[in-house]
Amino acid sequence: MLGRLILMRLLQAIPTLLGVVTLVFLLLHLVPGDPVDALLGEMALPADREALRHALHLDLPLWQQYISYLSGLVTGHWGISLVDHRDVFSLIAERLPVTARLAACSLLLALALALPLGVWAARHAGSGRDMAAMGFSLLGVSIPNFWLGPMLMLVFAVMLGWLPVSGMDQPDSIVLPAVTLGTALAAVLSRMARSSWLEAMGSDALRTARAMGVGERALWWRHAGRLASVPVVTMFALQMGAVLGGAVITETVFDWPGLGRLTIEAIQQRNYPLVQGCVLVIALIYVGANLVADVLGILLDPRQRRA
C-alpha cells in the first residue's frame, strides 16, 4: 500500500512540476529586461547584440525555446548559464548542500524550541503562561525574515561582536541565519503542538485511559504524545519545503552562498536557464516534502492506513 501511495503521489507531481516550469518560463520571458543588455550593457553595438542573441538561441520563437527547454529536461540537460557558460545542474549541485546545511540547522532549532513551548502552553491552557507562550509564537510568525535578519545582525554582530556579520567563513557564521530562518518555523510548530496535545487530551481514548487509572504523566507523554505526533510530524515534514522560501531572503541578507542567493542573482541577471533550474529544484523539494508528510501520516496513524 505504501509503494502504491508513493507511485500515485509521483504521478500526481508530474503535472504540478510541468505547470511550475511553464509558468516560470513564461513569466521570465514576459517581464521587462533583456539578458543581452545584462551581459553586454545597453551601449553595445547592434551587431554584437544580435550575434550574442543568436548564440544564446534567444532569437528563436518563444514556443521553440520552450520545446527545447522541455526536451532538455527530459534528457537531463538543464541548460547552460548565460553568464558564465557553466552547466546549470552543476551550479545548482554546488550550492544545494550549503542551503541544505542551513535548512537542517533551522529545522532542528525550530523543533527544539517548538515542542517544549507547545507542550508547556498546552499543560497550562487558558492561563497567563499559555497566553505568553502563544503571544511569543505569534510574534515569531509576524516578524518577517528581511527585518529580523538585519536586527540580529545589528545586535549580535555589530554592537556586541559575538558573531560574524555575514558569509560562511567561520564555524559560527550559521548561527544568525539559522535563528532568522528557524524562528518563524518554531512559531508555527509550537502552535500546532499546543492544539494537537489539547485535542489528544480531549479525545475518547484519553478519557478511557484516565478512567482506567493511567497516571497523568503517562497520559501526557505516552498516550497524548502518540496521538499528537501525527499532525506535528506532518507539519514538520511540510516545513522542509517551506523553509526554502525563507532561505531565499535569509541567504541574501546574510550573504550565504546557497541556492536562494543563487536564485536571486540569476533573476537579477535575467539568466533564464539558471532561474528555471533553481525553481525546478525548489518545486521538486516541495513535492518531496509533501510526499514525506503523506507517508509519515500513514505510518503514524492507523486510521489513515485503514482508510
Image (cartoon, rainbow, N blue to C red):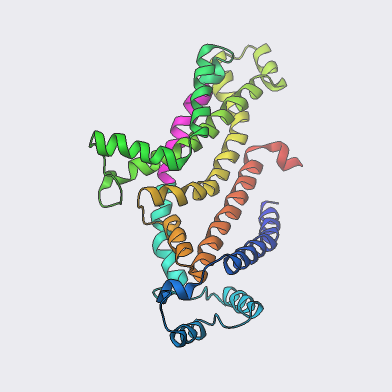
In the foreground, 128 or 261:
261
In the foreground, 287 or 78:
78
The residue sitting at 62% across, 35% down in the picture is 231
- Residue 273's place in the image compared with 160, above or below, is below
- Residue 119's place in the image compared with 144, above or below, is above
Q: Which residues are magenta?
A: 104-119
The residue sitting at 54% across, 43% down in the picture is 239
Task: Give left or right: position of 182 versus 64.
Answer: left
Does the image show residue 86? no
- Residue 297's place in the image compared with 195, above or below, is below
Task: Give left or right: position of 4 versus 258.
Answer: right
Task: Give left or right: position of 203 versus 169.
Answer: right
Look at the magenta stretch and give its main secondary structure: helix
Picture mark count: 0
Residue 156: name its quadrant.
top left
**Name of the residue lying farthest toward the right:** 307
Q: Does residue 106 show up magenta in the picture?
A: yes
- Residue 287's place in the image compared with 31, above or below, is above
- Where's residue 304, x and y in %? 71, 40
**Name of the residue lying farthest toward the front:** 43
The residue sitting at 35% across, 52% down in the picture is 255
- Where's residue 211, x and y in %? 68, 12
- Where's residue 19, x and y in %? 67, 62
The residue sitting at 56% across, 20% down in the picture is 122
Q: Does residue 11 show up magenta in the picture?
A: no
Q: Quadrant of the C terminus?
A: top right
